[in-house]
């Protein structure tokens, strides 16, 4: 279903996230998106209620893509918009580089460049761009990631991708990794996305902050 794919790409969501929204399996969702099976009325209602996708546009292409005008005009690159801080997320231009950083306090001290009101990610902590190739092919240089802070680091969804902020030997690091459970619960394994990089194991206590990556906004090529 071409328009469903278009809406998903606009929102920066994965097929897995869309499947969870519809409460169907990922394979089922893939078949819907590829027009092998049809959307049910329950599916349409869920898309309208949870993601504000316009059912009329979805079926016919008539009207706006979303029921909420703010989503139709949303852009993470639109500074100066009058947006309520209560339902928007700060955008920081300081990129995630997957390497050593001076201090995590720098981000908060600089303040956001602007705020983004984009309903699917409005529960996130911040947006930041990605720089470098260490996180490709899933996150490429120039992509913007939506990150939500994990309040309890013991409640980790292993196999998911996180932005990890780490303090080791007096140095601060930040990196995007897939988290894997270790046989020793006091350690955690960081699996790279880029196959050219090595897997590492670090003490759990060395993780200062942890943010699950809820989605991304791809750069325009």
Image (cartoon, rainbow, N blue to C red):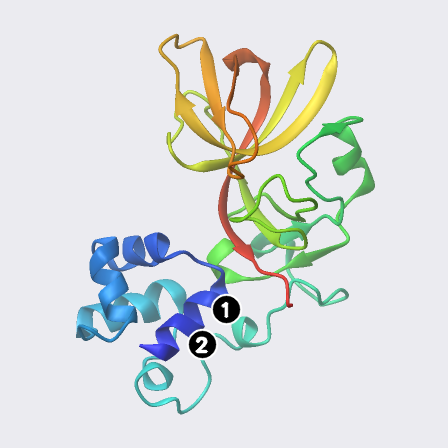
Q: Give the residue at x 42% y 66%.
A: 8
Locate residue 221, reporting x and y percent: 65, 68
Locate residue 157, reporting x and y percent: 37, 32
- The quarter of the rendered structure image containing the N terminus is bottom left
Locate residue 116, reporting x and y percent: 63, 59
Element type at marker 2?
loop
- 136 above or below 150? below
Task: Residue at the far front: name it.
Answer: 196
The crowd level at tag 2 (other Cα within 10 Å; few <14, some 14-19, many 20+) is many
Q: Give the residue at x 48% y 64%.
A: 11
- 218 above or below 147? below
Towards the viewer: 56 or 61:
61
Q: Which mark is residue 10?
A: 1
Towards the viewer: 7 or 63:
7
Proximity of marks 2 and 1: CB atoms separated by less than 8 Å = no
- Name the residue carrying label 2: 66
Q: Left or right: 191 with respect to 18?
A: right
Number of marks present in the image shown: 2
Q: Left or right: 119 with respect to 111?
A: left
Locate residue 194, reporting x and y percent: 54, 39
- 160 above or below 31? above
**Gap between marks 2 and 1 measured at Cα:** 11 Å
The crowd level at tag 1 (other Cα within 10 Å; few <14, some 14-19, many 20+) is some
Q: Give the residue at x 76% y 29%.
A: 105
Mark 2 against mark 1, which lies toward the viewer?
1
Q: Left or right: 55 with respect to 172?
A: left
Say which label, 2 or 1, has the lower sequence index.
Answer: 1
Element type at marker 1?
helix
């Amino acid at each position: 279903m071409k328009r469903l794919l278009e809406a998903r790409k606009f929102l920066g969501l994965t097929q897995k996230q869309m499947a969870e929204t519809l409460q169907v399996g990922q394979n089922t969702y893939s078949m819907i998106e590829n027009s092998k099976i049809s959307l049910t009325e329950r599916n349409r209602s869920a898309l309208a209620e949870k993601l504000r996708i316009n059912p009329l546009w979805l079926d016919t292409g008539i009207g706006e893509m979303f029921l909420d005008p703010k989503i139709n005009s949303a852009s993470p690159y639109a500074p100066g918009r009058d947006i309520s801080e209560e339902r928007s997320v700060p955008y920081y231009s300081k990129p995630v580089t997957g390497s050593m950083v001076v201090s995590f306090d720098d981000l908060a001290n600089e303040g956001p460049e602007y705020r983004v009101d984009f309903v699917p990610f409005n529960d996130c902590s911040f947006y930041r761009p990605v720089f470098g190739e260490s996180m490709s092919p899933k996150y490429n240089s120039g992509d913007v990631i939506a990150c939500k802070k994990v309040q309890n680091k013991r409640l980790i969804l292993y196999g998911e991708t996180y932005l990890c902020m780490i303090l080791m030997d007096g140095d601060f690091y930040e990196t995007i990794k897939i988290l894997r459970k270790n046989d020793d619960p006091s350690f955690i394994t960081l699996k790279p996305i880029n196959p050219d990089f090595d897997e590492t194991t670090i003490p759990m206590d060395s993780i200062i902050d942890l943010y699950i990556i809820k989605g991304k906004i791809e750069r325009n090529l």
